[in-house]
Image: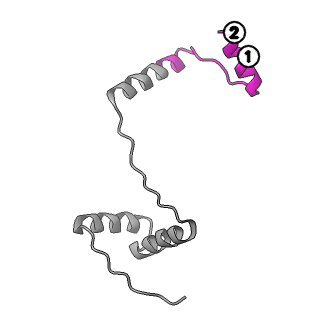
């Protein structure tokens, strides 16, 4: 494979943090950048992800669900989708 040099300007702290993460996996940052560029070239798609921020509403919903699970106030599991639909129709 013939290689080329790509110069990219990036925030210094972002570069350091990214190198640390890549290093924790034992992968050079350049390898990750190359893999991302290969995916972009092959798929023509750009993927971004962000960490979901826990909202107070979501915390309350999770807490309520945990209490229901601990109290045994749940239904299922169902063996088939039809069983689940039949249960919902009876509500």
Which residues fall within the magenta stretch?
67-91
Q: Name the spot of residue 24 as percent of width and height, x first.
A: 40, 64
Left or right: residue 72 versus residue 4 is right
Spatial CA distance of label 1 from label 2 is 6 Å
Name the residue at 37% across, 63% down: 21
Q: Which residue is mark 1?
A: 86
Name the residue at 57% across, 70% down: 42
Q: In the figure, residue 7 lies in which quadrant? A: bottom left
Compared to residue 33, the image places residue 66 above or below, namely: above
Compared to residue 87, the image places residue 17 above or below, namely: below
Q: Which residue is mark 2?
A: 90
Name the residue at 35% across, 39% down: 53
Left or right: residue 45 versus residue 63 is right
Instruction: State the residue lying farthest toward the bottom.
Output: 2
Colouring of the image: one colour
The residue nearer to you, when weighing 27 against 70, is 27
The residue nearer to you, when weighing 14 against 46, is 46
Compared to residue 66, the image places residue 21 above or below, namely: below
Q: Is residue 11 magenta?
A: no
Q: Is residue 85 magenta?
A: yes
Q: Name the spot of residue 28 as percent of width and height, x first.
A: 41, 74
User: Split into 4 quadrants, where in the image is the C terminus?
Assistant: top right
Kindly indicate whether the residue at mark 2 contacts the one at mark 1 (C-beta within 8 angstroms).
Answer: yes
Q: In the figure, residue 85 lies in which quadrant? A: top right
Q: Secondary structure at mark 2?
A: helix
Disc marking residue 33: none
Q: Mark 1, residues whose alpha carbon is within 10 Å: few (<14), some, or many (≥20)?
A: few
Instruction: State the residue lying farthest toward the front.
Output: 44
Name the residue at 28% across, 68% down: 16
User: Split into 4 quadrants, where in the image is the N terminus?
Assistant: bottom right
Left or right: residue 54 versus residue 90 is left
Q: Mark 2, residues whose alpha carbon is within 10 Å: few (<14), some, or many (≥20)?
A: few
């Amino acid at each position: 494979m013939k290689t080329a040099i790509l110069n990219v300007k990036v925030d210094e702290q972002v570069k350091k943090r990214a190198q640390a993460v890549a290093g924790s996996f034992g992968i050079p940052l350049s390898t990750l950048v190359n893999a991302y560029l290969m995916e972009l070239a092959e798929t023509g798609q750009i993927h971004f992800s962000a960490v979901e921020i826990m909202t107070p509403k979501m915390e309350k919903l999770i807490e309520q669900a945990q209490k229901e699970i601990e109290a045994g106030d749940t239904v299922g599991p169902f063996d088939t989708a039809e069983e689940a639909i039949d249960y919902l129709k009876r509500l």
